[in-house]
Amino acid sequence: MNKTRLEAFSDGVLAIVITIMVLEIKVPHHAAEFSGLLKLLPVFASYVMSFIYIGIYWNNHHHMMHSMTRVNGKILWANLHLLFWLSLVPFATGWMGENNFAKPTMTLYGMLLLMAAVAYFMLQSSIIASQGEDSVLKKAVGKDWKGKVSPVLYIIGIGFSFFNEWLSGAMYVLVALIWLVPDKRIERTIAHTKD
Amino acid sequence: MNKTRLEAFSDGVLAIVITIMVLEIKVPHHAAEFSGLLKLLPVFASYVMSFIYIGIYWNNHHHMMHSMTRVNGKILWANLHLLFWLSLVPFATGWMGENNFAKPTMTLYGMLLLMAAVAYFMLQSSIIASQGEDSVLKKAVGKDWKGKVSPVLYIIGIGFSFFNEWLSGAMYVLVALIWLVPDKRIERTIAHTKD
Amino acid sequence: MNKTRLEAFSDGVLAIVITIMVLEIKVPHHAAEFSGLLKLLPVFASYVMSFIYIGIYWNNHHHMMHSMTRVNGKILWANLHLLFWLSLVPFATGWMGENNFAKPTMTLYGMLLLMAAVAYFMLQSSIIASQGEDSVLKKAVGKDWKGKVSPVLYIIGIGFSFFNEWLSGAMYVLVALIWLVPDKRIERTIAHTKD
Amino acid sequence: MNKTRLEAFSDGVLAIVITIMVLEIKVPHHAAEFSGLLKLLPVFASYVMSFIYIGIYWNNHHHMMHSMTRVNGKILWANLHLLFWLSLVPFATGWMGENNFAKPTMTLYGMLLLMAAVAYFMLQSSIIASQGEDSVLKKAVGKDWKGKVSPVLYIIGIGFSFFNEWLSGAMYVLVALIWLVPDKRIERTIAHTKD
């Protein structure tokens, strides 16, 4: 089975997911004032967050695929399972943005992030299983504290969503930052070590 | 003619089909209660089924293309013919989900699955014809009981759809399971044999 | 400049164009009778025609790119110009289908096909110009009677569209058939010659 | 990290952005007169402009990636940042077209073009930083007067947008022309020199 085509298909789906989300930002019809745009701010903010999340998934997916040597049916379906949850992100984003981050929408968004994290973990496990004892990915995952902390923070965020939407949102933003910020620091450290 | 570009175009169309289906799950406007989501359950269920079907087609298409050695005009159009029926899946899925799996929507969905199966068979035949007597694909297809059983089950499902939508749906779910489940078992058997 | 990326981008745009057209076939809301589908027949018929046209363009584009050796800025923009007109096909298709092939919609559809044909011709000329005197594409185009007949038939179809929509549509169907049918016959002839 | 997949993902997003913009040209429902189309002229004009802008970005992105030798996390996120602003182009285009180029819509459009230019500059700087002292891209950028003039013209256009929408639009058209026209002239000059 062909790794290139699996990557190309995943790239295609992720590129479409990240782009069709913008269709949820409905153009205010026959209203050309900035005040009309201000009402869209929550929709825009939810779009920014989901764009970053899909970006993080694309980035991580990319690295994971890189370490993969062979594809089997289990990996293929585990990958489709991950894409399934990510394909629902535009829906959850639109619901959240349109309802001004109301509590139930934060619960759903957190559950979707959690399901995607579970699906990612399952895909990782399938690849490790296919690589056997000397799995390159297994060693990389051993040091991956981010992958272990994220689901815990999602669950805390879901818990918060039942009584305070902003604390809930803070958890989801925190996970995004964890993935965004230190990557750069680590690379800089590596670059320093090389000098 | 170039096989890579045929694959890339098919991947593109299938990635878009699988992703735009989610646009049929309309965000409940100005309603942030979970009760609003519950109404979407049939739409969601139909989305899951179609996602799996497109996944199966992508998987099988992938294998079939792998065994293909050269592309001619007939294969190219047989491939577009298959993509045509699959491109209608989001429409049939949306109609089925919005109308709570009403009988006529189940008839249409089954007919679409049947047409896609026929188109797949025609594409297969075109590739076999292009490969001549020693066709690799012909040998593979000889053992392919799933490809022969599926259209029969679709026809039974279409028949059921005129008096009971759930029996009809059960047939479509059954075909999906046939393609999903035993593949893994077969791979495990192969893995055992290798040990 | 990179030919592969030009092809990939064109494939992406054409794959999206061919697939988003299906979004113009609006799901009949809360109407699960077949009678609701019958009203969609003109929309469906217009979808079939445009699907075939985009398929023909993808096929021809594919062949033309194959004969191309180098890309320059002129070719790049001539290609984007062609994609521009093809990107409008979903709009013209939707307008035509929803209005039951009314005369003005047939005029617009024909004009769009004509503009796409002109853009295709310009792209072809840019490639030939870049190849110089021994242009492979120039020789191929010399025998290309289809490319010369099509615009004439489009113009006749546009003329018809002002007094009879069916004669107009017949012209557009005729062009599609010209591109679809004889290709197979020619291939068969070539196959016979080889025997 | 893999350059090919970065290009493929960017191509995918740009292909989708350029194509879904057409969905903002809403089919006039149950109105088959040309007068209905005339009302769409501003929407169509805004579509043409944005199509050209995305085409310019795709073209330039393509050249910049060509000169890139290695990808790091900073480049990857700088690229996603650029795609983020470009993904908002369909929204700003739709708002502008539907409101007949009203002043606030011209302000937003200009600000979006400016943000995209800033993001492009940041991506460029990330690539130059990764290439070190002998950066190929750094030399190319040194002669790039277009990249320096464009943001200035965007800011002038944004300023104009508060009292005259046409002067504002003229600035945006001017930038597009700057990128479109002289490229051809330069290539011709190069071709002459070679003769």
Image: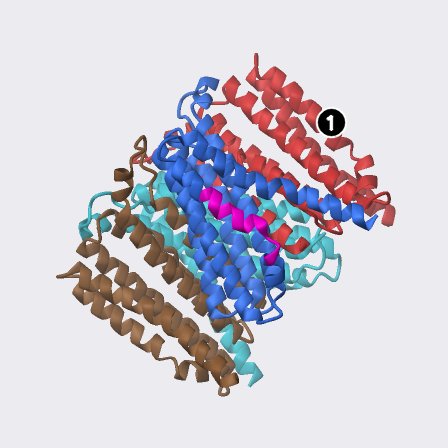
Chain colours: A brown, B cyan, C red, D blue
Q: Amino acid at mark 1?
A: Val
Quarter of the picture holding the C terminus of chain B: bottom right
Q: Residue at x 50, y 77 (%)?
A: B188
Residue at image mark 1: C149
Q: Quadrant of residue D35?
A: top left
Q: Residue at x 37, y 43 (%)?
A: B94
**Residue farthest left in this picture:** A163
Q: Residue at x 54, y 40 (%)?
A: D176
Element class at badge 1: helix
In this rendering, is residue D164 above or below B163?
above
Q: Quadrant of residue A46?
A: bottom left
**Residue farthest bottom in this picture:** A133
As drawn, is B17 to the left or to the right of B144?
Answer: left
In this rendering, is residue D101 above or below D153?
above
Q: Examine the rendering and report whether any part of residue B152 can be seen.
A: no
User: Which one is nearer the viewer's eye here, B100 or B62?
Assistant: B62
User: Which one is nearer the viewer's eye here, B172 or A61?
Assistant: A61
Highlighted magenta segment, given as a residue range: D142-154
Q: Position of residue A14 (x, y in %)?
A: 45, 58
In this rendering, is residue B101 above or below C42?
below
Q: Position of residue D66 (x, y in %)?
A: 62, 60
Q: Position of residue C186 (x, y in %)?
A: 78, 40
Q: Find out whether residue A72 is within the magenta segment.
A: no
Q: Position of residue C71 (x, y in %)?
A: 70, 50
**Residue farthest top in this picture:** C163
Q: Quadrant of residue D67?
A: bottom right
Q: Examine the rendering and report whether any part of residue A24 can be seen.
A: yes
